[in-house]
Image (cartoon, rainbow, N blue to C red):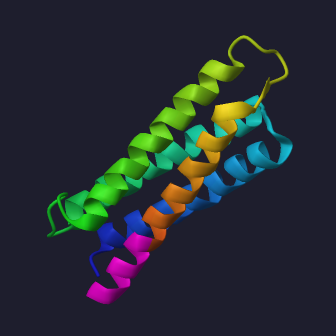
Amino acid sequence: MKPIILVGTGTITLSLILYSLGMISALKKQFITKKIVLLLTTGLVSEVIAVSCMAIGSTQPITTPHGLIGLAGILIMISIVLLSWNSIKSHQKGSPLTGKLYYYYQFAYVFWVIAYFTGAFVGMSQS
């Protein structure tokens, strides 16, 4: 496996850890804090680095099923981070995670985890 792919693999796993800490905390507390938003933002930065590394090292086009699922996953997480920052910007201690936003967080997290494991499966089957 190319070293750049290994860097991307490690970095995307860091994203999984950061997203999991942030999303599970938010869903469990049903509350978004600045700490949670920082975890999600750091996860997003990590994901962008990982995707860049894997795109550079990949021989496959983005139009593969995993490429499209991964693209949708990163777009969903961008929307989660933006919604989270918007949600806490006017609240000193944080913001409640209720209603449709709660369900969107659930959907986004599950979708992203599916995208992660789809990539892991594809990566393992190619090596």
Residue 100 pos. (x, y %): 64, 33
Near-viewer residue (1 or 82): 82
Is residue 61 found left or right of 50 in the rendered image? left
Which residue does the image show at 65% across and 43% down from the upper left? 103
Residue 92 is situated, as x and y percent measured from the top left of the image, at 82, 15
Rendered view: 109 above or below 41 = below
Q: Main secondary structure of the magenta part?
A: helix
Going by the image, does 106 lie left or right of 127? right
**Would you identify the image quadrant in which residue 51 lies?**
bottom left
119 vs 78: above or below: below
Q: Is residue 39 above or below residue 122?
A: above
Of residues 119 and 41, the one nearer the viewer is: 119
Q: Is residue 126 magenta?
A: yes
Q: Is residue 6 visible?
A: yes
33 sits left or right of 18 in the view: right
Whether residue 127 is visible: no
- Which residue sits at x=16%, y=68%? 60
Residue 49 location (% of width, % of height): 39, 50
Question: Where is the C terminus found, in terms of image quarters?
Answer: bottom left
Count of numbered labels shown in the rendering: 0
Measuring 34% from the left and 79% from the top, which residue is drawn there? 123
Question: Which residues, given as a range, are shown in magenta?
Answer: 118-127
Residue 22 appears at what percent x and percent y?
70, 47
Question: From the image, which quarter does the N terminus lie in?
Answer: bottom left
Residue at the far front: name it.
99
Residue 105 inside the magenta-drawn segment: no
